[in-house]
Image: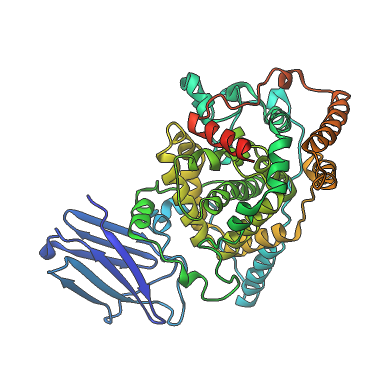
Amino acid sequence: MLTPDFQLKQDAETLTIIIKAPHARVTDTEIFIEGDEFRFHSKPYFLRLSLPGNIVENGREKAHYDSDKGVFTIEVPKETAGKMFEGLDMITSLLTPKTQKSNKPIIEVIGNGDKEEDKSQVDEEKEEDFDWYLEQKPYKENELSLDGPKYGFANQKSGVFKRLQDEVYDIVDLPDPENCSPTDRRTMREHAETEKFDLDHYIADLLDDESIQQIMKYEPPWCFEVGKKDTAKKIEFTDEEQQKMKSLPKKEYLLDDAMVTTLYLGLIDILFGYAYNVRINEGEENVESGWTICKLSATLSWLDTFTSVEEVLRSCMRRSLCFPLYRHWQLSTTVLKDVYCILTSGKKQILRCLLDIHTILNGSYPRYILNDLYITDYCVWIQNVSDKRLRSLASTLEKIQISKEDSGLDLVAFETCALDTKNDDTEETLVSSLTAVSIKRADNDSDDDTDDSTESYDSEDEGESDTEGTAQSESSMNK
């Protein structure tokens, strides 16, 4: 059976299902309506929808077939007139059978309706005032599963990299994913970032940022005014995006509160890499887009997880100053504002971003593996999340201020030296001043204890393409 293309529209009293089925046998067409379930069968097509509200057969339902276009238009009354259904364009969620959606026990509450309304109001307040912090538990070696460390969406995967051999280094920066604990991932990642930080590159972008200032003036697709009621109406899925949603797996997830919080935090991390790529390319994509998104996301490049919004933002800022072509603090803070706008725009905009990431990684061998580990599940999961929870996350992100001192890269000291000597007659004075600060920083770092496992790790990405290395080298030379 084929799943036909379809579209849902509504008004206050009716739901209209438009089904494109050009090869249907009209005489054999069957339509079934019961509660929140709608079924359409006309060989070779079959469509079953789990709707966000109930519809009824009361004699006012209508059906029409346009033989020229091969389109069925079915109009069905709503059980409760005036109730507007949400999520009618979340195709994957609509196609998921309600038996799979019932991932929580059904509890019948006996009492008056006022108490139920009070409970609903309390739940909404909890979504708005959610505490975006996870208690950090110490890692214990005996807590490892028999399959090794977990990673991927909701930490559901393990053993994936065993069969990839040398391709591992083209996908992630983590040297040994199958034998590296979550704690070690964080330690090794931050050590690699510190080693990769290029002072000359950073100062060059600081002192000569004309092109970067132009990039910051670009207005990406999510830059319409947030907070308006008609925001969601401005976001319409293309036919290609609808086809992608239709092909996604039909499932839901049994997740505890801690894991759900981790997924939201990882979402910020992934969206930051995507928003950076969109902004620096001014909406275009290129052969480096997959590399850029993954490199800036610690989730995708190090299989890392986070326990607070502060941790995520610190990681995003550090990585944006260590790896991509443009390494500029103000640019990175602008990208964080982009992430805020995406989250505030709601799950439709987030889903569009995730679907675009999915397409980019599919065309970036062998990074398509990261779709299987993370992005595909994120595309399915985001269709059922709470918009209030997303607004709460965006509000928290907006309130938190990450300073240059928080980066741990001594940016203030370097910038002070660079700006003090900017107008000096000789370039040697600037180089000498920065070298002095670098030596002092190196002396301080040598006093700190360093994990043996991180000392031997070469932070340079051996899997980067020649074009990536050439682009960054040429940029440094030009600066």
Residue found at x 24% / y 56%:
46
Residue 273 shown left or right of residue 239 in the figure:
right
Total marks in image: 0
Q: Is residue 161 above or below residue 316?
A: above
Q: Who's the residue at 52% across and 25% down the image? A: 168
**Extreme-front residue of the structure:** 425
* Image spot of residue 192 (x, y percent): 69, 29
Q: Quadrant of the C terminus?
A: top right
Instruction: Identify the image quadrant of residue 241.
Output: bottom left
Which quadrant of the figure has residue 448? Answer: top right
Residue 2 x/y as whole percent: 23, 51
Comparing 49 with 306, the one in front is: 306
The image position of residue 313, as x and y in percent, is 70, 48
The answer to whether residue 215 is seen in the rendering is: yes
Judge by depth and name the residue closer to the eye, 350 or 107.
Answer: 350
Front in this rendered view, residue 56 or 402: 402
Q: Would residue 378 be found to the left or right of residue 94 on screen?
A: right
Residue 70: image location, x then y, percent: 16, 65
Colouring convention used in this rendered image of the protein: rainbow
- Above or below — where is 230 with respect to 180? below
* Residue 252 visible in image: no
Residue 282 left/right relative to 40 = right
The residue under the point 49% across, 27% down is: 160
| Figure quadrant of residue 418 | top right
Front-most of residues 327 and 38: 327
